Amino acid sequence: MTAKLNLPRVADFLHEVGMLKRTPRTGYQFLGTGSENVAEHSFRTAVIGYILARMAGADREKTVYMCLFHDIHESRVGDMNYVNRLYNKTNDRSALEDALRGTGLEEEVIPLHEELDQNSTLEAGLAEDADQLDLILNLKEQEDLGNRYATKWLEYAWERVKTEHGRKLAGAIFESDHTAWWFESQDKRWWIERKHKK
C-alpha cells in the first residue's frame, strides 16, 4: 500500500528540489568551458534512461524514476566533482532521507536510491549509464566547439559506460555533431533566404 502524502511536507520538498536549478555541476570548473546545473542534468538523464530502458526491454518507469531522483540529495550536499571527492565525503543517503522525511515518498524513493547505489539490476545499470551519457553529450558539444580537454575526458567517460545498450548509444553520440539536429536538417537555401517552408 502506498503511503499517504503529507502535502505541506511535499511542498517543502518541492521547494528543495528547486534548489537543483541553482546547484551547479562543478566539473566544468576544471574543463574550462560549458556549464550545467543539477536540474538540467537530471532532466536529460531521465530522458536518456527512458531510451536505454526501451532499447534493453527493461522497466522504463523504474529506470526513469531512478534517473529523475538520482541526484536529489545534491540539494543538500551540492555536486562533488572528482577532485572534490578526493578530499571530501558526503552522506548522500542521510541527505536524501532528511529531504524526504515526512513527505510520504520515502518508501518509494529510498529503495530506488539503494538499488541504484548497489547497481544490482539492469535498470540500475541503465540509469548509471544514462548519468554518464548526459556527461558524454555535454563533453561532445565542448569537443565540437574546440575544447581539446573534453576529448581526454570523453575517454574516461566512455570507460564508465557498462551496459551493451549504453555503449551502443555512446557510440552514436561519439559519431554525432551536436549541431546536426538543427543546422544540417534544414534545406541549405533556408540559411540564405530565411523563408518559412510552405
Image: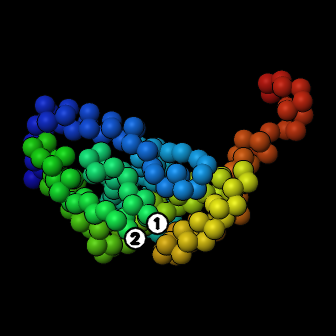
Residue 138: percent from left, percent from top: 58, 53
Using the image, tell me which numbered label, if any, was put on residue 125. Answer: 2
Label 2 sits on a secondary structure element that is helix
| Mark 1 surroundings: few (<14), some (14-19) or many (≥20) residues within 10 A | many
The residue type indicated by label 1 comes to: Asp
Quadrant of the rendered image containing residue 13: top left
Return the residue nearer the eye: 30 or 109.
Answer: 30
Residue 61: percent from left, percent from top: 35, 55
Kindly identify the residue that appears in the image at 28 percent across and 73 percent down: 118
In the depicted structure, whether residue 192 falls above or below residue 152: above
Kindly identify the residue that appears in the image at 40 percent across and 38 percent down: 21
| CA gap, disc 1 and disc 2 | 6 Å
Q: Is residue 53 visible?
A: no
* Residue hosting label 1: 129
The residue type indicated by label 2 comes to: Gly
Return the residue nearer the eye: 12 or 65.
Answer: 12
Using the image, tell me which numbered label, if any, was put on residue 163. Answer: none
Label 1 sits on a secondary structure element that is helix
Return the residue nearer the eye: 92 or 64.
Answer: 92
